[in-house]
Each structure stands twice: as structure tokens, then as C-alpha cells.
Amino acid sequence: MGKLKPHLRLKIDELFLRWLSETDTQEILRENLSLIKKGENIDYTPSSAFQYKSHGSPASPLLRVSSPTTPPCSPIPNSTPSPRSPRRRSTNKLSTSLSKSLTAKLFEDRKAAESNRQPVNVPQFYFPYGRPVDAGVNEKVLEKVSEVFRSLQVIRKHEMDELTLACGCPKYWRMALFHAAGGKDDVPLTEEMFVTMWQRVISECHDDSSRLFRLLVKPKCNYISAEDWYPMIQDVVNSHPGLSFLQDAPEFHSRYIHTVIARIIYVVNRSWTGKITLPEFRRSNILSVLQLLEEEDDINQITDFFSYEHFYVIYCKFWELDSNHDLFIDKKDLSRHNEHALSSRIIDSIFSHGSVLSSNSVQEGLMSYTEFVWFLLSEEDKKTPMSIEYWFRCMDLDGDGYLSMYELQYFYEEQLAKMEGLGIETLPFEDCLCQMLDLVKPLEGDRISLRDLKACKLAYIFFDTFFNLEKYLDHEQRDPFANMRNEETDLAEPSDWEKYAAEEYELLVAEEAGQEQSALDATDVEYQDDFELDDEDDEAIMSIDEAMKKLAASEPPESRTWNHNNNTTIS
């Protein structure tokens, strides 16, 4: 029998109490109790208490164990209702009883309270597009916009500074404003075009986050895709003083732009869709970074997204692995990263379905440049939430949302084999597992969840233990709690990625300087005045020229195309 509803239980309890308070019921219960005390059997044959009485009280159906063999005598007319329809009499009596009960009184009190309740106006506390501003503020902005157009008539792409300032927007919003209003390279903005767009934006969006989001997205779209960032980042490349040297190398513009876009998506897009939603955009620091671009002339001081030194390190690392320079790398290429530091099993997992690469990349067995950016950021800084999720997805082979003991053993087996091959003392898996469980302290003792790793401040040690032998051995020689003590201090330290990028950049610059010096030393040779070229020397010089031509041909090509999630085309 199913569980009774609360109001039905109240009625049944009340009926039971009414039956128990009947005089006949109490007499029968006393008789039965005395028989039980004497050890005699109780006679369950119906008695007069279970039949309809002359005063009209029906017997409770709860005690009718068996029906009498003989129907009851016909009641005296006008004294009791017909036994064919006891329900009417019973209902009237029950209603009278309920009206006098505490339950009925409770229902009546509630009904009276609801009828006397006054409506409560709860002020709106959630504003998905920002808290509305005073209409007068927007009117003043529109007046300033009209003044700008009265002086310029139409506004072209390179004349957006004054209009952007009139709207009260940061400098690098100008290309978003220009394109949202319908402007193009050969189509200037008119006052009607811009005012129509701006009125629509300020009527729906009331803060900077929602307004910039609306300016960036395509019409009738509720997310920012990778290509939506391109005009804004291109404007940064063209106008920021810290990137002026790139004007002489236009072939690197698209590579820098797509590196910046890849870093933005990596940090902001937490849903792994490549589409940034308004809540994700609002939680990010995009607005503050764009404002900092306007204030800081040294682009390398802006370590979030735009640092050229970071781009240089990423691109050089990719170029070293991309053996055929088609801007795609395969498993073999990726295995050479950091002198084969990663295990082959984690690399296989990276290229597997449902992990961290797009379905097209997995199908073709190739990693794009954008996906390499995400890989390198995750590999060199395993303390960020995105990097933890990146490697968790790679280690979760069955995709059940947990790292089982089997999965941990699967990755640790290759680490053991490597250590044995190098003659390093190994740690059995059982002992390693105990250490890792003590390190992570999972809520469920036999498996580790993503939440457990994000709550653990030493997740980077956990990951390196299972697939990066070089870093694992490095951690074994350090105090694992030293970094935790540094985090507790008030001094803000650079992230692991910033440290890595700074070190690698210095090495790359020193290596390039050494190559240039070697080239200068090779050409700085004193020849005698009577030096004459013979045929062999001519052939040698020609071979050198040919080698230089081949070397020049091996430089990064000026135009390449690659796709990210079948949406972004870079040319």
C-alpha cells in the first residue's frame, strides 16, 4: 500500500480516535483484554457493537473481519437510515465532527489568514543585463553622439576615437562599435546607422559587460565565437604602441591574433564549447584587460592574453614540433615536446574521442595550433581550474566523471617502466596510490572526482606523478608544502605559466642572438688583396647561396590556413 498523503492521514487518525472513544468499542476492548489475561481465545464473531445501533451510529468498517452469515434485522423506521445507503448519514456525522475538530479549525485559520494576506511587492534583485540607468544619462550620450556627427557628417573606420569617447566606452571598443553599427572598410557610418544601433543596445543592456557582449556577438546570437574577436584584436595590433614593430611583419598578425583569441577562450569559456556566453563573459576580466591596454604602453606587462613574449614562446614551441610546417602536429610531433617528457599513454588520451580535441582533430589525428595553445597552457601551469579540468578529461578514460584506481594504475605503469629503464628506484603502485589519496583526500575513498582535484592545492603534483616523469622527479626533490606556504603570504607571485614563459623567452632570445653572432663571425674574415676566385670557389659560393635560399624557404610561410572547430579560418 502506498504512503498516505498528509491530509488523508489526518482524517484517518481522527476517525480512529472517534471509534476508539465509542462506549461499545471500549467495552469490547476491555472484554478482549481480560480474555487475553486469562489466556483464553478471543471470539472474533461480530457482536452487537459492530452492527448499526438504534441511535444511528454505524459500526466501524475497520473492525469488520468477516461478514455475518445473517443480514441484520430491518431497522425501525425513521430511527436509522437504510443500510443500503449508510454513506449519507455517515458523511453528515463526519462533517459535523470534522467541523469541531482541531484539524478543521487549523484549515479555517489558514484560509482566513490567506484571505487577509496583503500582497508583498518584492523588488527585482536579479538583472541579467545590468541594473537600469537613468534615462537622462542615455539622453546626454545621444546628444554627444549627435554633436560628433554634426562635425564629421560620416565616420570612417580610422575616425572612431571621438565617437567612442562620446559613448563613454574604452578606446578599444571602437571596432566593435563600428562593425555593430554596420560599418565596413568601404562603408562609413552615418548618424542614423549608429544611433539606431546604440539605442537598441542601451535599451536592453545597462552595464559595460552586457553592452560589449552585445556589440561583439552576431545578430540573433547569444554567444561570442572565435571570429567575433578578430576585428577588435586586429585593432590592438594596428594601434598599440607596444606592437608597433609588427607593422613590418604583417605575416605574423594573424598568428598573434589567433593566439590571443585562443587564450581568451581557454580562460573564459568554461563549458568547452568554444562559445562564450554572457555569464562567462561577465565573470572574466576582459573589461579590465582592455582598459589596461589603453593605459599600458608595454604590451608584455599585460600578461593576460596579450603579452607578445608569451605569444613568441608559444609559437616557437609549436614551430619546433611542427616538422612539416603545415600548422598541424600529430602524436609523433607532440611526443617530442620537452624532450619526450609526457608519457605515450597520456598523448594517446589527448587524441582520443571526448577528451580535449575537436571531433575533426581526433578523426584526422592532428592537433591544430589553437589546440596546441590550450595544451601548452595546461601543461606548464597545472594549478589553474581549466588546466585541472583539461588533464582530468584526459585521464578519465571511461568518461564517468571519476578517476578510478584502474585508470590511475594504467597511467602509472608507464611511469614505472621509464624509471626502471633509467635505473631509478621505483615506488610500487600501491604505495603511490596511498600517497595520492592522502594528497587529494577524495570525498569518495575509492575514486577521485574533478571537485576533489580542484579543492586540492597540490593537483599539479598528482598529474605529474602519472604522466610527466621529469616534473615528477623534480617534485620528489622538493618540499611539496613550500609552495603552499608561499600562497599563504600576502606577496603576489607570478603564475607557473608566467615563470615558464619568461624563462623560455630569455633562452630563445639568447639562442637567436648566438646564431646571429655566429653568422657575423663567419662573414668577418680578412682576405688578401691578391685573393682571386677560382672555379671551385665559385661553386662553393653558389652552393652557399642555394643553401641560403633553402633556409629562407624554410622560414614561417607568409600565408597559412587552418581551421578550429570548422569555424575559424586563418589566412
Image (tube, helix red, strand yellow):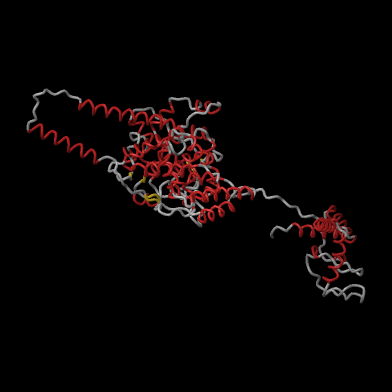
Q: Residue at x 46, y 39 (%)?
A: 387
Q: Residue at x 92, y 75 (%)?
A: 76
Q: Nearer the viewer, residue 34 or 3?
A: 3
Question: What number of labels is visible?
Answer: 0
Please state if 192 lies on the left or on the right of 328 as rendered. right
Q: Residue at x 50, y 49 (%)?
A: 151
Residue 476 placement (x, y as % from top left): 43, 27
Q: Nearer the viewer, residue 23 or 467?
A: 467
Q: Nearer the viewer, residue 318 or 218?
A: 218
Q: Compared with residue 79, is residue 319 higher up or lower down, i.e. above or below?
A: above
Please state if 66 lies on the left or on the right of 534 as rendered. right
In this view, the residue farthest toward the left is 535
Residue 318 placement (x, y as % from top left): 34, 39
**Residue 327's quadrant in the figure?**
top left
Q: Compared with residue 268, is residue 420 higher up or lower down, i.e. above or below?
A: above
In this view, the residue farthest toward the front is 151
Is residue 40 visible to the viewer in this orientation of the structure?
no
Q: Nearer the viewer, residue 378 or 26?
A: 378
Residue 98 placement (x, y as % from top left): 85, 61
Q: Compared with residue 465, is residue 154 higher up or lower down, i.e. above or below?
A: below
Image quadrant where one finds the N terminus = bottom right
Please state if 130 lies on the left or on the right of 551 as rendered. right
**Residue 422's quadrant in the figure?**
top left
Residue 53 placement (x, y as % from top left): 89, 68
